[in-house]
Image: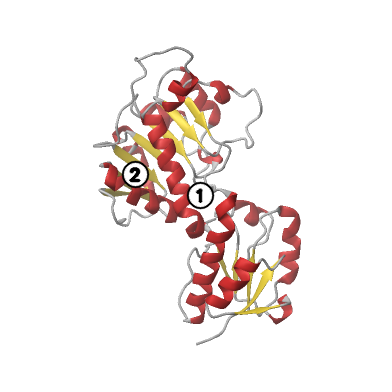
């Protein structure tokens, strides 16, 4: 068994340090001594320090975020070593938030909360028997599918290649996504942002969706054409949209989505910061243990694919 020599930076947070040791690794004080780096800071201004810490002996780097497009754009991620994202750390919390948005939409909670008079016409529906399309069945999507089953909803998982996903009634390859829009009562976006997924949901997809369908986005804002979505909501083309991520982000004050009766927004808080440090530390410990045992870590990034 190889003992990973892990540099925890830019600040050696106690939870991460303990996780490295619990996973069978050794924490080192300098990147020069390290064979691996657990990087805990997502802010762009600290990324040059990470790049400076890299050397040929660094075999693995753990990033602190699920989305990695900005790291790629900043030239941080290379193909000289293994990089992992934090999607597995945040999956339960983000999936829980996706479920909350889905239920809020189906039950019309946003309309009821905004009402200023008693209106029994605000009637929602149930997820029992509903078809939920989960677009992007990675760690977050799979966690959501498991949460949907006890509520009696059936999931269609959309993945790049269409390989079967546990718990899903059906798995569809990304190339056949057009066949999914008309069959779903709820569409939940959990996919990464890449050149191929940018504005995945535009006017054509929205026109193909059921008029009672809800669109939920906990993936990336760039997956949705915001202008097309506003037009579809204005026209009543779909029942509504519940969004934790938007494009642009942050959404400007005064944007139509803020007050739209068919929209429900949360400010990119699906993974609460109050729990992120603990869940990221758990992932670091798990991945250190996997590396020590010669196994592949969770969340391996493919720079060519962009996720």
For residue 116, which numbered disc appears in the image?
none
Residue under label 2, please give it: 176
Q: Residue at x 42, y 49 (%)?
A: 136
As displayed, is residue 220 above or below residue 3? above
Q: Secondary structure at mark 2?
A: helix
Picture coordinates of residue 158, whole percent (x, y)? 36, 48
Q: Which image quadrant is residue 19 in? A: bottom right
CA gap, disc 2 to disc 1?
A: 18 Å
Identity of the residue drawn at 55% across and 26% down: 227
What residue is rendered at 40% in x and 36% in y?
A: 102
Q: Tag 1 or tag 2, which sits nearer the N-term?
A: 2
**Residue at coordinates 54% horizontally, 35% vertically from top-left?**
266
Instruction: For label 2, count other residues whose C-alpha is less than 10 Å away and answer few (under 14), some (14-19) or many (20+).
Output: few
Element at label 1: loop
Q: In the image, residue 172 lies at what x, y percent?
A: 32, 48
Residue 219 in view, yes or no: yes
Q: Choose between 78 and 90: the one closer to the eye.
A: 90
- The answer to which quarter of the image holds residue 100 is top left
Residue found farthest to the bottom? 1
Q: What crowding class fits label 1: few (fewer than 14 Cα within 10 Å), some (14-19), or many (20 or more)?
A: many
The reply, left or right, for residue 179 in relation to residue 79 is left
> Horizontally, is 47 left or right of 102 in the view?
right
> Would residue 303 be visible to someone looking at this image?
no
Would you say 111 lies left or right of 280 here? left
Task: Verify CB contact (< 8 Å) between mark 2 and mark 1.
Answer: no
The quadrant in which residue 216 appears is top left
Residue that mark 1 sits on: 192
Q: Position of residue 83 (x, y in %)?
A: 57, 66
- In the displayed structure image, the side of residue 13 where residue 159 appears, left or right: left
Q: Position of residue 263 (x, y in %)?
A: 49, 26
């Amino acid at each position: 068994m190889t003992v990973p020599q892990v540099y925890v930076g830019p600040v050696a947070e106690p939870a991460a340090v303990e996780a490295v040791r619990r996973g069978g690794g050794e924490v080192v004080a300098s990147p020069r001594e390290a064979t691996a780096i657990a990087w805990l800071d997502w802010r762009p201004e600290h990324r040059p320090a990470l790049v400076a810490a890299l050397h040929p002996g660094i075999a693995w780097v753990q990033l602190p975020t699920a989305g990695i497009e900005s790291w790629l754009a900043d030239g941080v991620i290379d193909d000289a070593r293994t990089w992992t994202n934090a999607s597995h750390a945040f999956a339960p919390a983000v999936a829980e938030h996706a479920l909350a948005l889905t239920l809020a939409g189906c039950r019309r909670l946003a309309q009821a909360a905004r009402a200023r008079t008693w209106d029994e016409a605000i009637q929602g529906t149930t997820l029992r028997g509903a078809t939920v399309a989960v677009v992007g069945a990675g760690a977050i999507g799979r966690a959501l599918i498991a949460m949907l089953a006890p509520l009696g909803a059936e999931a269609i998982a959309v993945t790049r290649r269409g390989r079967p996903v546990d718990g899903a009634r059906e798995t569809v390859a990304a190339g056949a996504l057009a066949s999914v829009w008309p069959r779903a009562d709820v569409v939940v976006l959990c996919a990464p942002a890449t050149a191929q997924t940018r504005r995945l949901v535009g006017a054509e997809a929205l026109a193909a969706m059921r008029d009672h369908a809800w669109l939920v986005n906990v993936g990336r804002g760039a997956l949705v054409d915001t202008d097309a979505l506003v037009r579809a909501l204005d026209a009543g083309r779909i029942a509504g949209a519940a969004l934790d991520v938007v494009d642009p982000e942050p959404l400007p004050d005064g944007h139509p989505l803020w007050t739209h009766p068919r929209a429900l927004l949360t400010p990119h808080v699906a993974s609460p910061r109050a729990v992120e440090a603990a869940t990221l530390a758990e992932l670091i410990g798990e991945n250190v243990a996997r590396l020590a045992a010669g196994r592949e870590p969770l969340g391996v990034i493919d720079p060519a694919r962009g996720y």
